Image (cartoon, coloured by chain):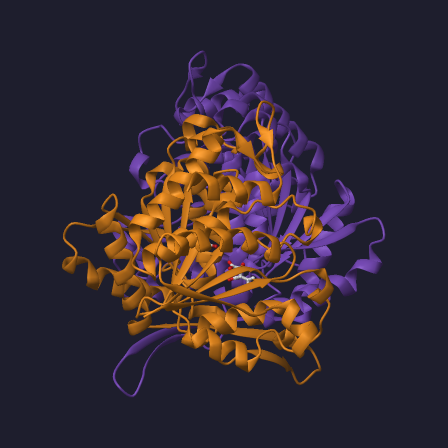
Chain colours: A orange, B purple
Amino acid sequence: MSQHILVLPGDGIGPEITREAVRVLEACQAQGLDITIEHDIVGGAAIDRHGVPLADETLERARRAQAILLGAVGGPKWDTMEDISKRPEKGLLALRKELNLFGNLRPALLYPQLAEASSLKPEVVSGLDIMIVRELTGGIYFGQPRGFGEREDGTRYGYNTYIYDEKEVERIGRIAFDMAGKRGGRLCSVDKANVLEATILWREVMNRLAPEYPEVELSHMYVDNAAMQLVRAPKQFDVIVTGNMFGDILSDAAAMLTGSIGMLPSASLNEHGCGMFEPCHGSAPDIAGQGLANPLATILSVAMMLRYSLNAPAMADRIERAVGRVLDNNLRTADIAYDGTRQVTTREMGDAVVAAF
Amino acid sequence: MSQHILVLPGDGIGPEITREAVRVLEACQAQGLDITIEHDIVGGAAIDRHGVPLADETLERARRAQAILLGAVGGPKWDTMEDISKRPEKGLLALRKELNLFGNLRPALLYPQLAEASSLKPEVVSGLDIMIVRELTGGIYFGQPRGFGEREDGTRYGYNTYIYDEKEVERIGRIAFDMAGKRGGRLCSVDKANVLEATILWREVMNRLAPEYPEVELSHMYVDNAAMQLVRAPKQFDVIVTGNMFGDILSDAAAMLTGSIGMLPSASLNEHGCGMFEPCHGSAPDIAGQGLANPLATILSVAMMLRYSLNAPAMADRIERAVGRVLDNNLRTADIAYDGTRQVTTREMGDAVVAAF
Ligand SMILES: CC(C)[C@H](C(=O)O)[C@@H](O)C(=O)O
Ligand SMILES: CC(C)[C@H](C(=O)O)[C@@H](O)C(=O)O
């Protein structure tokens, strides 16, 4: 039976990058991948049309899909909206929460062809290959109570709740231990257990799981130190597992170590292997519609989709190899172009990947 | 009248680095600075002696002091303590909170003599000079309620509260605007206002203060983007202001950009100019007692003390110039040594600074 894929382009460069990724998906279809591709809208685009960043019908469609391909959401047009529940980002957060996509995989991989793009010295980052496993449906992003209040003297305050329970930590821990077992066998759990109770529990649960994964070496690191170590000597890491907020910060820092955030995909999975796949970068409204955006992160997100949700690892490999060939051929979008390479548009890059597939 | 200085060496390398910094303080005394120097213990050392990381008498002494010089606290010996209230770090946190040291200044300054130490490319970091202003007595570090609980089905959870009120934000905001006014005139406020209510309030208050500081250009950045930008192009920043947790992470990342965290001091100030001064680095128990530690961050913390709490800016300048001369003379502790420099011990580095003063 054909598997449903829902494409949600979103805002800014979202439409143009997903367009190229969908072409790659269609190339897979032509090669026998049995999928049905549907389209809908989310984020600012949905606010403009429906008044909310995620319409009920869209959420229903998403529930029925095996996998979602998302571009990026947000932009200055919606940044001034007073009501936080109506911001484009809430569409994304609602999808994560409602579909229970707690397992966020964010690889930070340096392509040898793009080594020069990094702001770090070549010897510090060459061969970099980190997988960050971020918990995505808990922690301070969703903790209750949250909101605003007023003290007796009229002083206003804003507050959020950082909370994790054993089950939430255990399920993300298992994903991370499994991932480490399949990779270099080293898992670093990042917390702030010297200050925050929520992360003391986190550390406890990670320690409790460790004996079940004798092939994995578990270590712990405080988040401030992890931020330092990512800058100082990032190759010490294999798999990093951490909560929603720390994962947001560290995965972006790790991505930027490669110097080419336009190359990095991500996967967000639930317990049944359904997932949402999106580039790590944002909606870059400043360059939207100009053919400057790099579609490779979104195309590589399709590869993650094939690997993690559609059980088609061989096709995933083929896409990744096609991207490698295109880079070998010196094709570059503006963000990764430098002297001696050939600068191409978003569409031309998509063409090249499809041709190399 | 003589001003009281309280020295709290702490754990690990704390005693050896503060010893050298105190010698510099004594050199200032010999040049006419009217101070009285007292000593006490904190952190693991205090746990071993008193059973608590900060004894009441020590806190009383700290309250009477105009300034505190702190080494570093913590170490593996106390890491396994079940009771979080008895950890060495709690001594530090209690000092910050009890003395109301809400204004944490963390410079990330690249010494031209040490440019090679950075893991970033020279052109990305040369001339780097960022001041991070971190709120230090609020946010998730101290928010109530906090602790552990159990759901009906027996699942345990841990939780913390992230909370800021207008007054807390306003007073740290003013420190940051003032600082930006005295420096490059640019202030970047870091938050996660697209997700967290506590930081929506933060952003509101920063915006409200801005018109009072027409000479300062205020911008806002999400914390994940800030972590990326620090890696990508750190010189875009002049002053960064942020909350306690984000400040912990970003200031460590920024410090590591310089490659020589053994060089970076910090100040934590209250509304009356009393302050605690300490190196940015930790207690490095692995190298304690071997004469390998770099005392310069602690010596530079004395310079911050002179500038911010003792109203002796000229002497602060003299210390900073003395450190510069010692580096010019190629003297290096192990952490910053490389071929062609002269490696010296902690004590020898202290000698050299005192001689150059
Ligand atoms: C857009 C925003 C809500 C989101 C997050 O903070 O999770 C983004 O930064 C990400 O990392 O996917
Ligand atoms: C030791 C720890 C409690 C402390 C903090 O998190 O504030 C340290 O990391 C710092 O930044 O001074």
Image point (75%, 50%), residue name: B178
**Taking B207 as reference, is B86 left or right?**
left
Closer to the camera in the image, A236 or A37: A37
**Taking B136 as reference, is A200 left or right?**
left
Image point (31%, 29%), residue name: B290
- A124 over B96 or under it: above or below: above
Closer to the camera in the image, B120 or B288: B120
Residue A65 in the image: state x and y as whole percent: 42, 71
Residue A346 in the image: state x and y as whole percent: 60, 44
Residue B111 in the image: state x and y as whole percent: 58, 27
Residue B76 in the image: state x and y as whole percent: 27, 49
Instruction: Tell me if I can see residue B92 in this picture.
Output: no
Image point (50%, 81%), residue name: A145
Instruction: Tell me if I can see residue B321 in this picture.
Output: yes
Closer to the camera in the image, A184 or B305: A184
* Quarter of the view holding residue B90: bottom left
* Quarter of the view holding residue B24: top right
Image point (55%, 41%), residue name: A349
Q: Please identify the quadrant where the C terminus of chain B is shown.
A: top right
- B42 over A82 or under it: above or below: above
Closer to the camera in the image, B19 or A319: A319
- B298 over A250 or under it: above or below: above
